[in-house]
Image (tube, grey):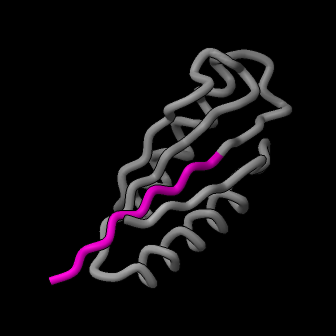
C-alpha cells in the first residue's frame, strides 16, 4: 500500500491590512474555509507578527501523488479566488 504526503507552502501578502487584527481576521476566515472545503491540515507558520504577510503550510495525505497535486492546484485556485484583499507571492510544493 502506497501513501503520499504533500506539503504546500503559500506566501501571502495582504496590502489592505493595516494591523495584525485585520490580517488575523482575514486569515482566520481563510483557514476555516480551506479546512472545511478540502479536509486538510493548514496552519500559519511564518510572519505571525507582520501585519501584511503570512506563510501558510497545508498538509495533504493521499494514496497517490497525482491526487496530492490535484488537491494542491485546487487549494491554490481556491485561495486566489478567496483572497479579495491579498495575493499569493510564492507557492511551493513537496511530495514525499
In the rendered view, would you say 57 is above or below 25? below
Considering depth in this image, is 19 or 87 the residue closer to the camera?
87
Q: Which residue reaches farthest left?
A: 1
Considering depth in this image, is 21 or 11 the residue closer to the camera?
11
Residue 89 image offset from top left, x and y in percent: 77, 47
Q: Residue at x 52, y 56 (%)?
A: 8
Q: Locate residue 62: give its quadrant.
A: bottom left
Residue 91 image offset from top left, x and y in percent: 66, 55
Q: Residue at x 59, y 72 (%)?
A: 73
Instruction: Classify residue 4 as left or right of residue 88.
Output: left
In the rendered view, would you say 43 is above or below 52? below
Residue 12 image offset from top left, x and y in percent: 70, 42
In the rendered view, would you say 45 is above or below 32? above
Considering depth in this image, is 55 or 39 the residue closer to the camera?
55
Q: Locate residue 25: give its quadrant.
A: top right
Name the magenta segment's main secondary structure: strand
Q: Which residue reaches farthest front?
A: 96
> Number of marks in the image?
0
Residue 34 image offset from top left, x and y in percent: 48, 55
Q: Residue at x 76, y 38 (%)?
A: 13
Instruction: Classify residue 48 as left or right of residue 6.
Output: right
Looking at the figure, which quarter contains the N terminus? Answer: bottom left
Q: Which residues are magenta?
A: 1-10
Q: Residue at x 50, y 34 (%)?
A: 44
Instruction: Classify residue 14 as left or right of residue 20.
Output: right
Instruction: Classify residue 28 as left or right of residue 78.
Output: left
Amino acid at each position: 500500500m502506497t501513501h503520499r504526503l504533500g506539503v504546500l507552502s503559500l506566501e501571502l501578502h495582504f496590502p489592505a491590512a493595516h494591523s495584525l487584527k485585520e490580517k488575523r481576521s482575514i486569515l482566520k476566515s481563510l483557514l476555516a474555509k480551506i479546512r472545511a472545503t478540502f479536509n486538510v491540515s493548514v496552519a500559519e507558520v511564518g510572519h505571525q507578527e507582520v501585519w501584511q504577510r503570512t506563510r501558510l503550510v497545508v498538509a495533504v495525505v493521499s494514496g497517490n501523488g497525482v491526487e496530492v497535486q490535484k488537491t494542491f492546484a485546487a487549494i491554490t485556485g481556491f485561495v486566489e479566488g478567496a483572497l479579495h484583499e491579498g495575493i499569493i507571492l510564492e507557492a511551493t510544493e513537496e511530495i514525499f
